[in-house]
Amino acid sequence: MTTAAFPDTKPLVADRESAADVSNALVGTGIFAALAVLVWHVYAIPLGNPYYGLFGNGVDLYVYQAGGAAVRARAGLYSGPVFFDMEFTYTPFAALVFVTLTVLGPLTMKVLWWAAIMAALVALVMVCLRALRYPNSPRTWLFAAALAVVCTAFEPVRSTIWLGQINVFLVLMVVWDLTRPRTARLRGLFVGIAAGIKLTPAFFLIYLACTRQWRAFWIATGSFAATIAIGFLVRPGDATTYWGQQFSASARVGPVDSPANQSVNGFLAQLLRFYDVRRFAVHNSESTVYVAPTWMWLAVAALFVVLGLAAAVLADRSQRTLLAVTMAGLTSACASPFSWGHHWVWFVPLFVLALHHGCVAATRYRWLPCLAVLLTSFCWWWNYPGRPPIADAPHPIGIGLFMLPRDDLPAWWANIAVPYYAGCYPLLFLAAAVYVICADRGRMPSNGTESYRPRRIAATEMQPDSLTGCSRAG
């Protein structure tokens, strides 16, 4: 069997076969890991912390509700803050969607939203497993639920729950939509709707064009355009303001050199701050922000985009659809001017792919991708007891690898650790993209005259793995 990175369905099974069901041992391991994560949630970053506890915030959900309330009150969405000092940064169409939240009280809204996030997370893992040809069985669903709980220990997922974010729903919409057969009815519809709510999924229009999925491209483009038209129809003033000037203003989201900005733009801005390149410092009355010039971050982002799309196209050509979609999603997070950690929920399908790779590959280092995803995306935390308190919390807590201490480090270690902290998510994406490209080049036919199509593996060639129940071909 091929040893390509994160193999998808076709290299593993024949067209009419399904991957073996997950074994009791693997389900048990998943449940044990899920229980360990639940204990970690209670004690590591205390669940009872009034601000940093897993359910102690929800500020972004309140912003969504405030955006919906502004629509109902016929107030301006972009004329100023909608919730304390926080502005509404989503599309007018998104505000129309969020009107549904205005009929709920705060506690009811948060409980329902958290439950919906977990349901969407389980569904996302299950969609990934089904894309890898695991059977639609109760055991697979149980394993998917366990993996979903494990994934809550990833910083992007925990931040999604903690802030009440929407990204897991958007990723689910895109992954479900694009892992369907290409002949599926209205394939691409939900990509356009997701882009109409939050612009980042619009990157998949480029992916669909690069992979020549023209039917899905035009359906996605049409549904995206429909969301824009609905915004202009219902909120013409807000739509004109948003599409005319607000949608490209990343400064409205936060300081571009924030450690939590894990886009290429944020990575470069953090490096400029760390090395104190003062020619790129922008001073205002409150603080100094380091900003990478447009030409700089666009040039570097273009390199990441080319590598990401190349990996996605190669994966698509070899019929590894889930890998292709995942690489495109990670690329979109890199290319965005501002990507908070929770934008990287794409690590969930990447983790499923890496775990699958560890189960079925025959290489010595087959678990390294899984380990890389776990170590990079894990919700590392650090207490800062000497800093002023935030809200009702006694002191700040840094959450995520990019929030680990940067001050007072030995110079030799700071020059290694800080650049890695600053761009840990883009760097993991870069490693994955290069890995996929290099592995795929090794799989191409020697004459180079035709696209790679994986060979069919007969059932007699499949040898069950004793631990996982996945199949490994020699």
Image (cartoon, rainbow, N blue to C red):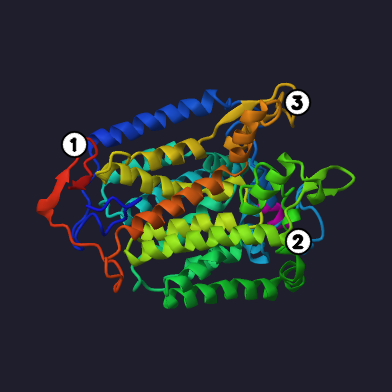
Asked if one can make out residue 124 in the rendered structure from this viewpoint, the answer is yes
Question: Judging from the image, what secondary structure is the residue with disc 3 in?
Answer: loop
Disc on the earlier residue, 1 or 3: 3
Towards the viewer: 184 or 375? 375
Q: CA distance from mark 2 to mark 3?
A: 34 Å
First to last magenta residue range: 64-73
What kind of residue is marked 3? Answer: Arg
Q: Residues within 10 Å of mark 2 (few under 14, many from 20)?
A: many
User: What residue is rendered at 49% in x and 78% in y?
Assistant: 218
Q: Tag 3 or tag 2, which sits nearer the N-term?
A: 2
Magenta stretch contains residue 67? yes
Q: Is residue 204 above or below residue 21?
A: below
Res 15 quadrant in image: bottom left
Going by the picture, which residue comes out furthest to the left?
460
In the picture of the structure, the residue carrying the numbered disc 3 is 387
Kindly state the secondary structure of the residue where label 1 is placed: loop
Circles 2 and 3: CB atoms closer than 8 Å: no
Q: Position of residue 234 (x, y in %)?
A: 69, 72
Residue 55 seen by the camera: no
Q: Is residue 474 above or below residue 204?
A: above
Determine the secondary structure under disc 2.
Answer: loop
Q: Is residue 280 above or below residue 456?
A: above
State the image coordinates of residue 236 (x, y, percent, origin top left): 74, 73
- The reply, left or right, for residue 49 in relation to residue 366 is right
Check disc 2 and report the residue beneath it. Answer: 77
The amino acid type of the residue labelled 2 equals Leu
Question: Badge 3 local density, few (<14 within 10 Å), some, or many (20+)?
Answer: few
Residue at mark 1: 466
| Dot 1 amino acid type | Ser
